[in-house]
Amino acid sequence: MLYQRFLLLSTFAICSSSYAQSEPDLQQQINNLKQQLAALETKLHQQHAKALDEKTETTHTEARKSKVEVGGAVRANLGINSYEKGNKDRHGDFDFDMIALKFNGNVDDILLGAELRFYDYMTTVKYAWLGYEFLPNWEVKAGITPVRFGNQPYNSHSYYFSPNYYIGLEDDFDLGILVSRQMKDNWRLDLGFYKNDELGGVDGYVDDRSKRYSYDVVNGILKLTPFTLQMAK
């Protein structure tokens, strides 16, 4: 807008004075106006570049702000059966299943994610990791990280999960390092190294090796329940 006004006034001034000035004076005035226009264009370009730099810096600063989101869930089951008179008379019973607490976000440049689960029979860590974006679209995570196998995140999140979950091949989390690259068209490349399971392998210092979210081969006896699996090596 400023540039257009300046150009309009300059044209009007040239036309108004063309009758009263000689040709050399008119040419000099045109040259002066061209110089002023060039200076104005340079100034506008500088102001535009400065505004872009300030916007980029503001966006980068906002992205670096620490932000940790806390979420979770409470889950219960309603069981109704016809073979138990008390349950039938009460029209079923609610049974507590679990409480989940989730943490996701960043502290400065450090990414983090964790989920704790409290069941009526155990307390366990589903995953817990720290991460860092060392290059654009490249990040590394260390800790109890997801094992990238199976049709995630779909098959193992139904009511009954999937057979792959119960044999330890899907929705699995182990101790290790995961490097990920976000690619185009929703494709992602994952490279992971896992030293052992999330409870420390065969030498893990835990009271009960079955108190885990993931299904693993552990050093113990074969024990099948609706929620846990222990298999001898």
Image (cartoon, rainbow, N blue to C red):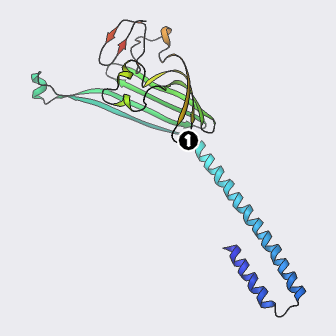
**89 vs 146, nearest the viewer:** 146
* Residue 58 x/y as whole percent: 63, 51
Crowd band around label 1 with a 10 angstrom C-alpha radius: few (<14), some (14–19), many (20+): few
* Residue 61 x/y as whole percent: 62, 46
Q: Secondary structure at mark 1?
A: loop
Identify the residue at the far bottom of this view. Answer: 20
- For the question of whether residue 204 can be seen, the reply is no
Q: In the displayed structure, would residue 71 be above or below residue 168?
A: below
Q: Is residue 52 left or right of residue 106?
A: right
Q: Quadrant of residue 72?
A: top left
Q: Which residue is mark 1?
A: 184
Q: Is residue 51 left or right of residue 74?
A: right
| Residue found at x 80% / y 69% | 39
Q: Is residue 82 left or right of residue 158?
A: left
| Residue found at x 55% / y 32% | 189
How many numbered marks appear? 1
Q: Quadrant of residue 156?
A: top left
* Residue 114 x/y as whole percent: 47, 29
Amino acid carrying label 1: it is Lys
Q: In the displayed structure, would residue 20 be above or below residue 3?
A: below
**181 vs 41, nearest the viewer:** 181
- For the question of whether residue 186 can be seen, the reply is yes
Identify the residue at the far right of this view. Answer: 24
Q: Is residue 155 left or right of residue 64?
A: left
* Residue 195 x/y as whole percent: 54, 16
Q: Quadrant of the C terminus?
A: top left
